[in-house]
Amino acid sequence: MYATTTQQEYPPLPTYDLTPLPPLLPPIPDKLLTLLLPIAAYWGLSLLFHWIDTKDYFSQHRLHTPAEVLKRNHVTKWEVVRDVIIQQVVQTAVGWVLGMTEPDDVIGQDGYNVVVWARRIRVAQSLLPGVLSLLGVNAMQLATNVQGKYPGLAGALVGGRYPKLFEVVALSGGNTASIPTFAAWETNLAQAIYWFIVPACQFIVGILIVDTWQYFLHRAMHMNKWLYTTFHSRHHRLYVPYAFGALYNHPVEGFVLDTLGAAIAFKVAGMSTRQGMWFFTGSTIKTVDDHCGYSLPWDPVQHLTSNNAGYHDIHHQSWGIKTNFSQPFFTFWDRLLGTVWTGGDVSARYERAKISAQKKVDAEQSGKESSSITNTSATDSQSQSPKPYENDLKQSVKLRQISETLQQPSAPQGKAALQAAGSREQVLDDSRYGGRSILAEEAQEEKEVRTMLRKSPRKRTTSSFSGTESLKGLSERVAGSMHGRSAGILGMESKR
């Protein structure tokens, strides 16, 4: 049976009956599953990385050692777990309210929607002769020339007219009628648009909204001292990120930055409940992976975009805390607005706190090289505009009050020096969990690693922070720093 239509040149719209969409995992309703899956993904993936940590797998790809987790972080793992659970409780409550505003997903209308898209394609074809005439092309003549070999193309050129495409349908009383139908290519294109292109566009819109929301709010929390010290500094007690610390935030920040931003993206993109299920879960997986502490060459999540664990790890260091704000998908806002780290390779800095177990791998991996985890060169510091850091050095009042010894290692001249100054000033602003002690630790570690490198029998290289060639073999040398650690480092340490 067909619905009536006043435009008889188009195939009629079919009728349909709506029925509830069966749950993806019976008997759990999809709306409830949408709340549960991100939490399950968060802890499942986090525990996987924690298990990898404890088993010492893939240590050659680890950005930091367990010793650094214990020494450099200023929050216990129990506190991290507690605050993540608080954020997930808030996230679940907001998701429940959001679900109440959404209609239940139904099935039965898909065929109708495909026909709607096919008719739109037919309408678009009706505009083609006029467009071609503006270009000086005679659509009728062109259609005549291709009619024999490409009848479908000929029909499109003359405005979507296909006189031979019809079907006979039975009517009540034993009568029949001929109605127009769609060309096969129109139906195939309509199905591709409905099933693939439209959902892809919805996800892209959602991603762009989340990236934009998080970039500007995240950046604001670093540029405004009150916002940083009151809310965001809590997340940066993790100078060495690990997977289950991805959502370690102040509850207010967790709600505004993560939960609210994702909800707005879901609504604006017009996603269904099941689309939201995959969107929220995918975003969670990406966020956990960005904080996992590994640069894994075979991890697909880390190669989808340049915004990965290595990129975000820079943002957690005391010298890069006011750079690399983009989260969680792409880095285009950092690059457009000049906030991407410009100091080049940071291998020397990643040598700190790895000294005690470094000698073995230094000998074994001599001669091997690894590329910079930042994908930047020290020359970027001189070539790029200093914006938005041009005033950071002048505004670094606390930094000027400490000795140059505590400001080591030094960054390359130019933008990187301004970025490092602003970042260190922000560390000094956080008097409770940051302050001079952080810079003192790092300055001492820098002194020790330089002493070690001078004594190393292998060919010595220096980091881009001294203005010369970057250190070689970081990813290989990290392996040695994983050995000889105590169980306490890997476990849930008590509060210091």
Image: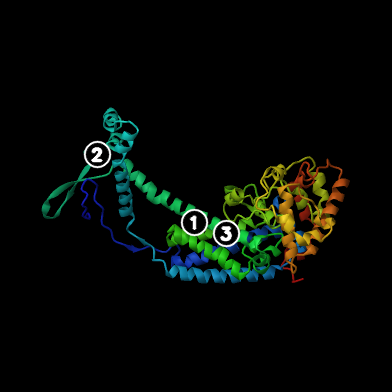
Residue placed under numbered mark 2 in the picture: 162
* Mark carried by residue 206: 1
Nearest to the eye among marks 1 and 2: give it: 1
Marks 3 and 2, how far apart in space?
50 Å
Determine whether label 3 and label 1 are within 8 Å by CB.
Answer: no
Q: Position of residue 466 (x, y in %)?
A: 80, 46
The residue pinned by badge 3 equals 214
| Mark 3 vs mark 1: in front | 3
Q: Residue at position x 65%, y 63% from top?
A: 224
Total label count? 3
Indicate the position of residue 304 as horizontal and vertical percent values: 57, 48
Residue at image location 20% in from the left, 48% down from the top:
8
Where, quadrant-wise, is the C terminus in this rendering?
A: bottom right
Label 3 to label 1: alpha-carbon separation: 12 Å
Q: Nearer the viewer, residue 328 or 30?
A: 328
Q: Is disc 1 surrounded by few (<14), some (14 to 19) or many (20+) residues within 10 Å?
A: many
Q: In the rendered image of this protein, does residue 349 appear above or below residue 26? A: above
Which percent across, then down, holds residue 53? Answer: 70, 58
Tell me: 330 left or right of 10.
Answer: right
Q: Earlier in the sequence, mark 1 or mark 2?
A: 2
Give, as a three-letter code, the residue at label 2: Tyr
- Residue pictured at 35% horizontal, 33% vertical: 135
Per the image, label 3 sits on a secondary structure element best described as helix
Residue farthest toward the right in the current orientation of the protein: 455
Residue closest to the far top: 145
> Which amino acid does the dot numbered 1 rest on?
Gly
Q: Secondary structure at mark 1?
A: helix
Say few, some or many: other residues with alpha carbon within 10 Å of mark 2 (under 14 / 14 to 19 / 20 or more): some
Which secondary structure, mark 2? loop
